[in-house]
Image (spheres, rainbow, N blue to C red):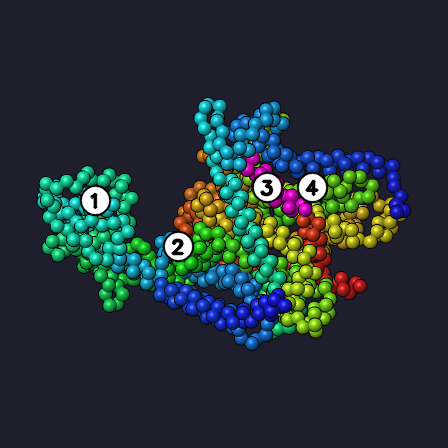
Amino acid sequence: MAIVTGKQNRWRVWAAHAFLIALIAITIFPLLAVISISLRPGNFSTGSLIPTEISFEHWKLALGIGYMGADGKWVSPPFPVLLWLWNSIKIASISAILILAISTTAAYAFARLKFRFKVPILNAMLLLQMFPAVLTLVAIYAIFETIGNHIPWLGIESHGGVILAYLGGIATHVWTIKGYFETIPAEIEENAKVDGATHWQAFYRVLLPMAVPILMVVFVLAFIGTIIEYPVASILLREEPNLTLAVGSKYFLQDQKYLWGDFAAAAVLSGLPITLVFLFAQRWIVSGLTAGSVKG
Amino acid sequence: MNTIVRTAAAPNWVAHLKWPITIALALAMLYLVFNVYASGQAMWALGLLTLACAAFYSYLGNIGFAWRYLFPGLAGMAIFVAFPLIYTMQIGFTNFSSNHLLSLDRSTKYLLDQTTPDEPTIHSYTLHRDGNQLRLSLAKAEGSAKLLTEPFSLSTDGVTPLRAAPQDASRDIGAALSMREVIATRDALQRLKIALPSGEILNYAGLREFARLTPVWKQNPDGSLTRTETGEQFAPNAKTGFFESAKGDRLQPGYTVGVGFANFARMVNDPDFRAPFFSIFLWTVAFAGLTVVFVTAVGVTLATLLNWEQLRFRTAYRTLLFLPYAVPGFISILVFKGLFNQNFGEINAILDALFGVKPAWFADPLLAKVMLLIVNVWLGFPYIMVLCAGLIKAIPADLYEASAIAGASPLTNFFKITFPLIIKPLAPLLIMVFAFNFNNFVLIALLTDGRPDFINTKIPAGTNDILVSYTYRIAFKDSGQDFGLAAAISTVMFFMVAALSIWNLRLASKGMREAAQGK
């Protein structure tokens, strides 16, 4: 490019590097610190940030294994981290699959079929997703208490209830999948129908296989969205063995019982996989974000 | 040949099953609806029936198969997003709270179920083992003649009364079971009825006693209740949601009644409530506003820098700077909670070593606010950075070439070209960031819980609570489980969110129109 560069330019480049490196240092300091803390013995010691002595005691507790403490007392895990992780993964997987199923079918109807009130329903969906669930917690609690009176496995203190509550948040996913379906020519399905396929077969056997990439993205987005969800899970689940990781992690850092090192190990153990999945899916997520910015 | 027959037969087989399955589902639904109705929740039963009819109509009726694809998704949104909004508004006009949990019917039934043991019929008892079964030995007073019941098992249904006969003093019935064992059998004991030789029936009246139970309350035709012992009358008061006597005594539990605009009036009129509510509102707006300003400043600066072609390692920088967005929020917020800890936290350890200060991040209201903003900027800037990177890429390069010929400095470039061009498409997104942080419950709940609290408030309130975390506290934590008041505050917030959304849509559609005209 034909940009004339001045003499101070070299200094500017160096200054930019210094600024960025300083900012990155601040940004990733908490993440590095927590890894170091998880390997440092004890819950209170504020020793050096680079541990002088590596200890796996916190990791043992996070993995649910006890160990013999220095004072000869058996130290058992304070919280069932692996159980919470399992609860989280179970709830997130089932929710993501169901969310994917119902938003794909709805998106198909919006993209391909003609029916009354199509535009009003699409607009209503856009408007509804502006109201986060955290504003309606009182009503959600009351609804699930009532459901629980009749169907206990879908009520308060049940994973079925939490999954059911998450099935409302599909508006964005419907829009994403609908946008993708619209880029696939409808003629392919129509050909299939000419060849004798039913509606359902044209959708299931012809359209869906072509849309696998977007379905995977929506699955990952829904999975991450539910695994990090806190407000709804925190009112529906209260008892220790039922908690998800997002709700349970809080109990490591109470004023009366401050387990900083144990928390650090649990945080790295559970946070790392989710972060990796997110970074893996980052390309699509970012393109989704910027696509949204262009459309508004 | 075989395979062809099988594949051809399969759909037929399914078609035969269609109606039996439909009927089974319909019966199951009707059973559920009936159960809900029988428990006194007519409105819920009606809603469920409507939903079930809509489902059957979509899949069996002939309104077009579009609705078969739409139904599950739309039902999910209607039940768990739209209905809670309406239901919250409705609760906002009632006194639904821990003191007023039940409906009038259920609260009346609860009171009518209350019983009191008849003083002269109280028998103390001991529990004895008899093979696999149990027996009770009853005595009216210490040393009086004992009665022994028939043996019973733990699974007894308690329908037929257990006969008790005078106990043969010479008979060895073994030692009485300990209190712990009695507690373990309590469920069975509560179901027991014991028929005395006189014909009188005794019920379980406590861990030590059986007695004849009489109801505490008698219902009058007008719905009021009379205390059987004293004859005192309690009438339901539809204004307060309590059974009240003429003297003004109230019975617990109360029941849910509509209170009109009382919850909303409290936000404006009640001075004890208004003061903290108002400062929480101001902090909510300040918190969301300052977050937007800071994340935009950091995000735009970084996006501009990372778009500079003479800079090397840009991809590596971008990936590292994106990390805060990739780490699950509940983990990074709690990590900060630990790092900012006044005595054991690493941040204070560094500050102490460098400057000799140990700020009380969690005890000082102002420092807590500063901490919340720092953490929130850390969490939020990558999003803006990524958005702006896309927008800056779209700016035509010839603009910068022209400015270079004119000899403009990078700062001039930024303020005269980059910023004016990206702020328009960015504006609607910044409004969404504002709206998100306006309701950023997770950050407050996990980092400070709104603490430190205001001193001298009737309902506990935190100095750095935002509206949504304050609402959560009123509804689910230490502030009396006042669901009605919490729902009323939520209703006010709906309108604010709706206003922000409309503003956002206006700006976005305006931007799109201008873009279209530009083309």
**Mark whose residue sits in front, 1 or 2:** 1
Same subunit, labels 3 and 4: the answer reads no
Q: Are marks 2 and 4 in contact (CB under 8 Å)?
A: no
Circle nearer the viewer, 2 or 4: 4
Find residue B511 and name its label: none
**Residue position marked by numbered label 3 in the rendering:** A271
User: Whole-Å distance between the Cαs marked 1 and 2?
Assistant: 48 Å
Cα–Cα gap, marks 2 and 3: 37 Å
Q: Which mark is residue B321?
A: 4
Per the image, the residue denoted by label 1 is B130
Q: Is residue B103 magenta?
A: no
Examine the rendering and report whether any part of residue A257 can be seen. yes
- Within 10 Å of disc 1 (Cα), the crowding (few <14, some 14-19, many 20+) is some
Asked if residue A265 lies in the magenta stretch, the reply is yes
Q: Which residue is mark 2?
A: B97
Residue B472 in view of the camera? no
State whether discs 1 and 2 lie on one chain.
yes
Q: Would you call the spot at circle 4 few (<14 residues within 10 Å), some (14-19), or many (20 or more)?
A: many
Kindly identify the amino acid type of the residue bearing the numbered disc 3: Gly
The overriding secondary structure of the stretch rendered in magenta is helix
Cα gap from disc 1 to disc 4, whole angstroms: 74 Å
Q: Marks 3/1: CA distance?
A: 57 Å
Residue at screen point 68% across, 60% down: A209
